[in-house]
Amino acid sequence: MKNIDHPIANTTQIHLLDLVICLSDTMDLISPDVVNHHKQVAYIALNIAGELKLSAEQTNNIVMAAALHDIGAISLKDRLSTLCFEMEAPHRHAELGYYLLKMFEPFSGIATLVRFHHTAWNNGNVTKAEREQIPVGSFILHLADRVAVLINRKKEITGQIQPICSKIEALANKTFMPEQIDALKRLAKNEYFWHDIVSSTIGTILSLRAQTKAIEMDIHEFLSLANMLRRIIDFRCRFTATHSSGVAACAEGLARLANFTDRMCLTVRIAGYLHDLGKIAIPSELLEKSSKLLNEEFSIIQNHVLYTHNVLSAVKGLEVINSWASFHHERLDGKGYPFQLRDVDLPAGSRILAVADVFTAITEDRPYRKGMSRGEALQVIQKMVIDSALDTEIVSLLIHHYDTIDALRLSAQSASIEEYRQFLKLQSAYLN
């Protein structure tokens, strides 16, 4: 594992599908029952779009939307409910997913597809307003999603083809577009189609079939993407709803005090937004537990760092951000996790993230406790320096500029609180 301490390039070629598929895989780690569900829906949708001769751009957006279609299902309970063919309040997680994804402009089309992916065709009797805003891809996602949930993972697939097709066909016009069902029926005649859906290598199959290209993003565009992902990470848990914004602000402030270049400072900020990316694989019920965690539960939460590393490792061009973000729980004495790296292996960026993460965690208010005072926080952090957990020079910068760094944290988290309130308001609208 290399000690990397360089800023992200001015422009970076990013395969968004690679990132989306990795995010999808991480979300599906929340339970064995949902493993590969997003990729199955993406594969089915890809083939239906192909049968309908949709454009490459339409097809690519449909595939990426399919890979993220349940991103608004925050809790484990919500995720498992999406596997029921007849869902209660199906539009809730679709609307929340739309709210989260639309914050990144290149995902605006994908967000709209996700928003309407549980809209029934209703014999074509949609209102004029609905016809103007619901893309055909949303109806494809709905069909692909419902086909995927009808598959019994414990049974051989070929024996399920006829019952699945019969159930779907019975809902022609009422629930699904007839021409899309016709496309599915043509595909259903090919056994390879069904074997691909349940294949353990469906991710590879999907990547080979989807003809997506890398897009060039400058550092500010990538900052916007990271900020969207920050909301997806943090809004899953009311206890840490503003955590990553605080870490990012503190880390960038410390980087400027350490005389990092402007581009390196922005890179640190991006790493701060993404440092807890792997928490999307952790059930929100566990993240929100206010009582003491059991050893097994703590181990599950610790896994989030490895998940972060795995997601970012799969996307070329993010090596620097990955090292800074994924090493924030390592210690100088080699007793951290998950890699047990020592001081010689830890770049300055990751050391800054480690200090920013600890500082933010102990000073921010949580629903079950007030944040620590200045004296309490410094006592904790200085002890971690003595114990060879945190970098002396970075902590020294924090001590000498405490008020400045704390003000940056408070400002960033205040803005995030307003965003989170809007998110909760949207959630409540679908609960009442």
Image (tube, rainbow, N blue to C red):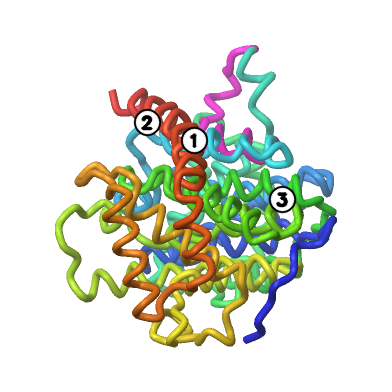
Mark 1 lies on a secondary structure that is helix
Res 222 label = 3
Viewer-proximal residue, 301 or 97?
Answer: 301
Mark 3 lies on a secondary structure that is helix
Q: Which residue is mark 2?
A: 424
Looking at the rendered image, the disc whose residue lies closer to the viewer, 3 or 1, is 1
Label 1 packing within 10 angstroms: few (<14), some (14-19), many (20+): few
Q: Is residue 331 left or right of residue 117?
A: left
The region drawn magenta spans 109-128
Q: Is residue 118 left or right of residue 82?
A: right
Res 411 label = 1
Q: Position of residue 247 (x, y in %)?
A: 49, 52
Image quadrant in which the N terminus is located: bottom right
Q: Is residue 122 magenta?
A: yes
Q: Is residue 227 magenta?
A: no
Precedes in sequence: disc 3 or disc 1: 3
The residue drawn where x is 29% and y is 62% is: 379
Q: Position of residue 404 (x, y in %)?
A: 51, 44
Labelled pair 2, 1 in contact (Cβ < 8 Å): no
Precedes in sequence: disc 2 or disc 1: 1
The single residue placed furthest to the top in the displayed view is 128
Q: Up-down: is 76 above or below 323?
A: above
Question: The residue under label 2 is which amino acid type?
Answer: Leu
Viewer-proximal residue, 28 or 131?
Answer: 28
Question: The residue under label 1 is which amino acid type?
Answer: Ser
C-alpha distance separating marks 2 and 1: 20 Å
C-alpha distance separating marks 3 and 1: 22 Å
Q: To which quarter of the image does residue 91 belong?
A: top left
